[in-house]
Amino acid sequence: MDNLCHKVDDLINATETNYKVQQSVDHKIDELEDKICKALIFEKFQVAKLMIDVVNFDMSDLYHDRMYLSSKKAEVFDLKKANDACISQDGYLVELEDNSERDFVLSFIEKIGGATDFAIGGNDVAEEGKFVYYHSGEPVPQKVTWLPGEPNDSLQNEDCMGFWYAKKGLNDIRCDRVVKYVCEIPLTC
């Protein structure tokens, strides 16, 4: 009986050791996959820089797993037309996830300037006050902060979302306003 107990104890110890080794191996694999993914994203960024239509778009630096483009020419905004132009560059109108991304895009447009407003993908065309993204249809996250008092529909029919250049923040704007627009280009693994 003692011999059987020792064998059971040995088996339990071996199982625990194997489990710890497996956890360590899994952790190392995760770290390696993360490094490979980051390298792949950087490589995609380098290739994308060569493929972007630089006649019509200004380009941002790499931000996490994406980059941004701004139209060079301010023109009357059209959600579908602008999103189609973004799609032609393998992206879509910007869909902000949080204030960190908002701040990055804001710093990008501050560098290029050239317009009063920069439109992104948020809009409340379907239901006043409920901003959703044009490309995904997802609601604009509550954690994305607008300028104080915005959105307010102050000029009536301010159904699109954009950066108000002079005030350095998010504002609701008329969808037929003369603006530049900003595309988001995902560079995932």
Image (cartoon, rainbow, N blue to C red):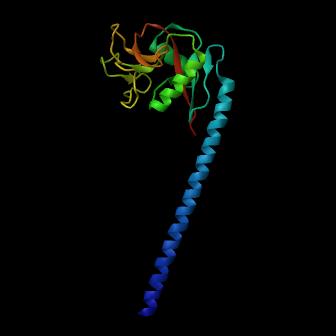
Q: Is residue 28 left or right of residue 150?
A: right
Q: Nearer the viewer, residue 124 or 3?
A: 124
Question: What residue is rendered at 62% in x and 13% in y?
Answer: 56
> Residue 64, percent across and down?
56, 36
Question: What residue is rendered at 46% in x and 28% in y?
Answer: 96
- In the rendered view of the protein, which quadrant contains the C terminus? top right
Q: Nearer the viewer, residue 165 or 176?
A: 165
- In the rendered view of the protein, which quadrant contains the N terminus? bottom left
> Residue 152, percent across and down?
33, 15
Question: What residue is rendered at 54% in x and 8% in y?
Answer: 74
> Residue 7, percent across and down?
47, 85
Q: Total number of numbered labels?
A: 0
* Residue 68 higher or lower than 15, as above or below: above
Q: Which picture quadrant has residue 55?
A: top right
Question: What residue is rendered at 55% in x and 67% in y?
Answer: 21
Q: Is residue 163 left or right of residue 68?
A: left
> Residue 61, percent across and down?
62, 28
Q: Is residue 77 left or right of residue 185?
A: left
* Residue 41 higher or lower than 93, as above or below: below
